[in-house]
Amino acid sequence: MGNVVSMANVLIIEDDQRIRESLARSLADRGHHVSSAASGMKGVEQTVEESPDVVILDLGLPDIDGQKALKMIRSVSAVPVIIATAQDDEQEIVRVFDSGADDYVIKPFSAEHLDARIRAVLRRSTASPESDVVSVGGLEITQSSRQAVLSGDLLELTRKEFDLLSYLAERTGTVVSKRELLAEVWRQPYGGADKTVDVHLSWLRRKLGESASSPRYLHTVRGVGIKLVDPES
């Protein structure tokens, strides 16, 4: 497993030839095997053909929008995707995570920084969960199929809603701070806006048939964080 993390098959989808070639050289110098594509459609095709370990995806592509390319990749592969973007707008970042991104880097960035992000997403993607299924009261979460069922009914969750619910369910009864959720679910270790967490919690509560004022599974501990509990216990 250590070799997988230290060396990876990396696909770079980037239309700027100078950036593309510079990144490819730098990552190859760090021991990675690198291939590249100059357009979104070509990148999606190479993702299918090459089955890379990780994809670096630029959002500003000439043929199709980067988020559309991301959704196309997600429809055919679970490969970790790191978004490369010149935008640091919070809503834009939330959108790319909800579309299926695993991490992001803001341009300009160094090859050293990108290499660290690659190793981080590979560590996460190769980590084996202790249990594939987590059950809390009438809620059952299956990691491998990324499905959550409440009292026999399948919940229609976005990628981030599932990640948030799963993270809290794995820590049932434990209060988790919003800072930890931003770091572990949204991969924003240097801080971010609490409203990102609040908005997703609000959506999640609605789908669980509860509200902040009448909680069942998701309980806010004011000034501390949020915890998921078994409402039947």
Image (tube, rainbow, N blue to C red):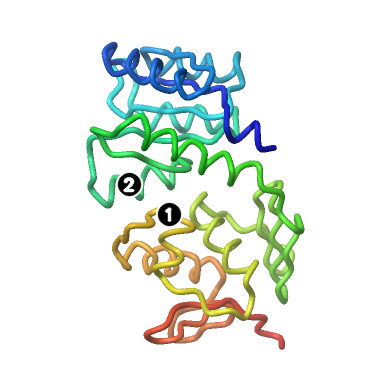
Where 68 sits versus 218, above or below? above
Q: Amino acid at mark 1?
A: Trp
Q: Image height check: is 92 above or below 110?
A: below
The residue under label 2 is: 93
150 vs 53, nearest the viewer: 53
Residue at the spot 64% in from the left edge and 75% down from the top edge: 172
Residue at 52% across, 14% down:
45
Q: Say the numbered circle drawn on residue 186.
A: 1
Task: Answer with the quarter of the image where residue 181 lies.
Answer: bottom left
Above or below, comparing residue 167 to residue 69 in the picture: below
- Residue 224 image position (x, y, % from top left): 42, 82
User: On residue 135, which mark appears?
Assistant: none
Q: Secondary structure at mark 1?
A: loop
Within 10 Å of disc 1 (Cα), the crowding (few <14, some 14-19, many 20+) is many
Circle 2 sits in a helix, a strand or a loop, which is it?
helix
Pick the front one: 47 or 149 = 47
Amino acid on which disc 2 is placed: Ile
Q: Residue at x 57, y 32 (%)?
A: 6
Q: Mark 2 to mark 1: distance in Å?
A: 9 Å
